[in-house]
């Protein structure tokens, strides 16, 4: 007897097929069962799904294709996981199959039933070694029986004394359901609170699982070391696994299987880990919750932080969002009703650093009063020199890699523009190349200006590579306490491409082999450098000259996080007779971002920014979505968006009167890889209204994409709750 199975499968993005497809199957499939099904000429992985509330009758004469096979040995994905996928698909305007299948390990998507069966088969026992031949005397002397070794007793989890603030916060986490916003200054010991919270849920239930998320791959190894050291003695080394895109496909599959089967009690990962199959999830931690890396920027543009909060509420798991500089959305959500806020999160504060460590003193350098064209002001250079001579470390922050953002010819005005993008090619001096950081196009630096033949092509602007070179020149005669010359190093996306390169450089930093570290934002957060006593931000003003209303928030968070790398070890700072400092070189020292930074006053900064957003009707007091169109010409991209708006008006779509649709405009970088990009902003005062309108609009967007006049459209997409405009 044949049954109808509803399978979520990844269909082409613009196929307008968003719901699970119907297949014939010889057995009744439990929802969540993994299967392989035919789609077109291919055979794909799919997930058995609940039937629709009102299934449509099959057209007469239609014969369903059959499920190819059921993947053996795996328990069905649980109802909580399926609800998470369904919610994400609905909220972010994607298909259920796309979200469900992309959340599974890549290797699992390509496996046949036979391959998975072999993968899940227990390893064959190793053959016992052959016994050496013994003489008669040896046989008589050998014991006839050996007592088996006693099984090791479970180790207790090492205890760490909590500060008064940590103990108070942990007590509130224990007593309240959450979600929680843990607002703790850099160095206040938030990680120890996470560890205690995980320990509490694991001890409360022998099957409980915890998910701990970080924004960057490079933060995962050090966090894994801390969690493994804390929990492996009691639960075993296999109880802690990682999930991030930097792992190989076999490693990702192994971690996913450990989480799905419950063998892994703790999962550490980046944003992709929010979709991990954790059937006994009891706790979710989102560290550095403000970080933009939690927002996916390709395919389904989901926010892992927001999905973590939804998943916790749906499954009853506690959720802790932690940051020294929370996002303004989270800060607003944690404002109590007495202050006019929604009070959706319980705000917990840890304003003090562990021990006697003090927050760094912030010094602003007005570059208008410094020598012209100086990369490092004389006072800052003197401060760095003193740190090197005392054996201390310094961190120089510039969030722009390469040697210079552009090459320029003063005679004819030629610039190193990318031929495929509306952006400049960045000059990388180390290998004498020009690289586009948008499309990846690379070419050799020309010997002369391609426009006029002028041999003197000048670099404009500064990058981390140039800062490293300049510091090596300025510090070439400066010696460390051991008499060796100062060592300058750089950590950015260019120096960490090779496998293990980042770990080597971080180890050198921790060991004291590096005196001055130049880096981008990848070293400004999460790292616990014990010898750094000075952090300097070079040319941060460029982040303020942006049309994006979130630019001040991003800059303040970056500088606060960078400042937090200094003076983390109070004992070391006291022994050195030093003081932790944060230097900011700026042409606008009176900017409110820098004045709030001087006093480390995030609440005041947040209050001012939220008031400005309230006055302007911006998030979190309004809700936004962006519809983007990519085409071969800018005219075609904007024509599609204009036609979409007109179609909504002509059809008099529900909720149209409650949604404001702005005219389409080119994106900031309007051409990437020879594709023109335009966008259109939608705003509403109600989240539900915006989502319901988008749901009604989706079929019209699909229909327009198939019309002849819009064939030049390469793709279109909807970005709900965009982080950049």
Image (spheres, grey):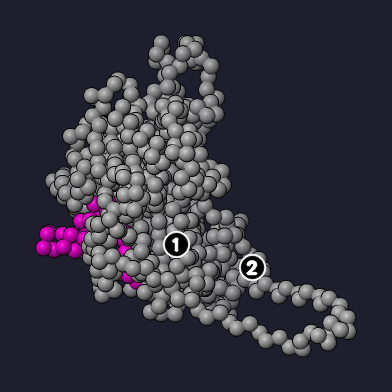
Which is nearer the eye, 243 or 646?
A: 243
Residue at image x 31%, y 49%?
A: 574
Label of residue 352 in the image: none
Q: Element at badge 1?
A: helix
Determine crowd level at label 1: few under 14, some 14-19, many 20+ residues with C-alpha closer than 10 A: some
Start-end of magenta stretch: 317-343
Magenta stretch encompasses residue 342 = yes
Mark yes or no: residue 398 visible. no
Determine crowd level at label 2: few under 14, some 14-19, many 20+ residues with C-alpha closer than 10 A: some
Q: Position of residue 512 (x, y in %)?
A: 46, 45
* Left or right side of 576 for 273: right
Q: Position of residue 694 (x, y in %)?
A: 31, 54
Which is nearer the eye, 423 or 465?
A: 465
Badge 2 is on which residue? 119
Q: Is residue 625 above or below residue 678?
A: below
User: What number of labels is visible?
Assistant: 2
Q: CA distance from mark 1 to mark 2?
A: 30 Å
Residue at image x 81%, y 77%?
A: 131
Label of residue 226 in the image: 1
**Do callouts 1 and 2 mark residues in contact (Cβ within 8 Å)?**
no
Q: Residue furthest bottom?
A: 144
Position of the N terminus, as image quadrant, is bottom right
Q: Quadrant of residue 544?
A: top left
Q: Position of residue 621 (x, y in %)?
A: 19, 52
Which is nearer the eye, 649 or 263?
A: 263
Magenta stretch encompasses residue 719 = no
Q: Quadrant of residue 461?
A: top left
Q: Element at badge 2?
A: helix
Residue at image x 29%, y 21%?
A: 371
Mark yes or no: residue 348 visible. yes
Q: Position of residue 197 (x, y in %)?
A: 35, 70
Considering only order in the chain, which callout, 2 or 1, is on the residue closer to the N terminus?
2
């Amino acid at each position: 007897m044949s049954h109808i199975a509803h399978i979520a499968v990844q269909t082409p993005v613009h196929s307008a097929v968003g719901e699970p497809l119907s297949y014939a199957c010889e057995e009744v499939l439990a929802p969540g069962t993994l299967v392989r099904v035919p789609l077109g000429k291919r055979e794909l992985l799919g997930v058995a799904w609940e039937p629709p509330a009102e299934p449509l009758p099959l057209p007469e004469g239609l014969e369903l294709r059959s499920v190819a096979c059921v993947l053996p040995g795996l328990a069905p994905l649980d109802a909580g996981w399926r609800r998470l996928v369904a919610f994400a698909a609905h909220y972010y305007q994607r298909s259920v199959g796309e979200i469900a299948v992309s959340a599974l390990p890549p290797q699992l998507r390509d496996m046949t039933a036979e391959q998975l069966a072999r993968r899940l088969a227990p390893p064959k026992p190793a053959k016992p070694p052959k016994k050496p031949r013994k003489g008669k005397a040896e046989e008589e002397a050998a014991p006839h029986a050996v007592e088996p070794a006693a099984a090791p007793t479970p180790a207790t989890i090492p205890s760490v004394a909590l500060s008064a603030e940590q103990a108070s916060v942990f007590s509130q986490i224990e007593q309240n359901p959450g979600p929680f916003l843990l607002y703790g200054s850099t160095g206040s010991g938030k990680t120890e609170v996470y560890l205690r919270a995980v320990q509490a849920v694991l001890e409360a239930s022998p099957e409980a699982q915890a998910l701990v998320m970080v924004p960057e791959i490079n933060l995962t190894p050090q966090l894994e070391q801390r969690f493994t050291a804390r929990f492996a003695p009691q639960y075993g080394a296999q109880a802690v696994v990682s999930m991030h895109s930097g792992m190989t496909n076999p490693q990702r599959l192994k971690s996913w299987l450990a989480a799905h089967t419950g063998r892994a009690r703790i999962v550490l990962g980046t944003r992709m880990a929010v979709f991990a199959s954790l059937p006994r999830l009891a706790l979710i931690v989102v560290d550095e919750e403000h970080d933009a890396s939690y927002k996916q920027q390709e395919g389904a543009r989901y926010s892992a932080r927001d999905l973590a909060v939804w998943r916790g509420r749906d499954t009853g798991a506690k959720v802790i969002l932690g940051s020294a500089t929370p996002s303004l959305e989270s800060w607003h959500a944690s404002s109590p009703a007495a202050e006019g806020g929604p009070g959706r999160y319980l705000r917990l504060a840890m304003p003090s650093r562990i021990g006697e460590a003090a927050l760094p003193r912030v010094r602003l350098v007005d570059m208008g009063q410094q020598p012209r064209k100086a990369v490092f002001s004389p006072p800052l250079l003197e401060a760095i020199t003193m740190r090197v001579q005392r054996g201390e470390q310094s961190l120089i922050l510039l969030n722009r890699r390469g040697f210079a953002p552009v090459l320029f010819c003063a005679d004819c005005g030629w610039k190193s523009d990318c031929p495929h993008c509306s952006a400049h090619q960045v000059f990388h001096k180390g290998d004498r190349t020009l690289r586009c950081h948008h499309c990846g196009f690379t070419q050799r630096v020309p010997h002369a200006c391609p426009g006029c033949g002028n041999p003197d092509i000048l670099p404009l602007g500064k990058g981390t590579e140039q800062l490293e070179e300049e510091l090596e020149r300025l510090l070439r005669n400066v010696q460390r306490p051991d008499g060796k010359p100062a060592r300058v190093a750089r950590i950015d996306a260019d120096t960490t491409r090779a496998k293990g390169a980042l770990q080597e450089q971080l180890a050198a930093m921790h060991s004291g082999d590096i005196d001055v570290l130049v880096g981008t934002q990848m070293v400004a957060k999460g790292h616990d450098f014990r010898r750094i006593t000075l952090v300097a931000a070079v040319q941060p003003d460029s982040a303020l000259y942006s049309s994006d209303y979130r630019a001040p928030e991003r800059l303040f968070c970056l500088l606060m996080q960078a400042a937090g790398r200094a003076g983390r070890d109070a004992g070391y700072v006291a022994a050195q007779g030093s003081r932790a400092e944060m230097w900011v070189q700026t042409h606008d020292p009176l900017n409110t971002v820098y004045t709030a930074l001087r006093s480390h006053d995030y609440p005041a900064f947040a209050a001012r920014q939220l008031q400005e957003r309230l006055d302007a009707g911006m998030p979190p007091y309004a809700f936004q979505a962006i519809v983007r169109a990519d085409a071969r010409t800018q005219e075609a991209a904007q024509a599609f968006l204009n036609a979409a708006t007109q179609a909504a008006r002509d059809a008099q779509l529900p909720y149209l009167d409650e949604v404001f649709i702005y005219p389409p405009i080119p994106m900031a970088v309007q051409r990437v890889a020879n594709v023109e990009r335009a966008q259109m902003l939608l705003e509403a005062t109600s989240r539900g209204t915006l989502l319901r309108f988008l749901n009604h609009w989706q079929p019209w967007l699909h229909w327009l994409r198939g019309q002849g006049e819009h064939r030049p459209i390469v793709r279109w997409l909807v970005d709900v709750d965009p982080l950049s405009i």
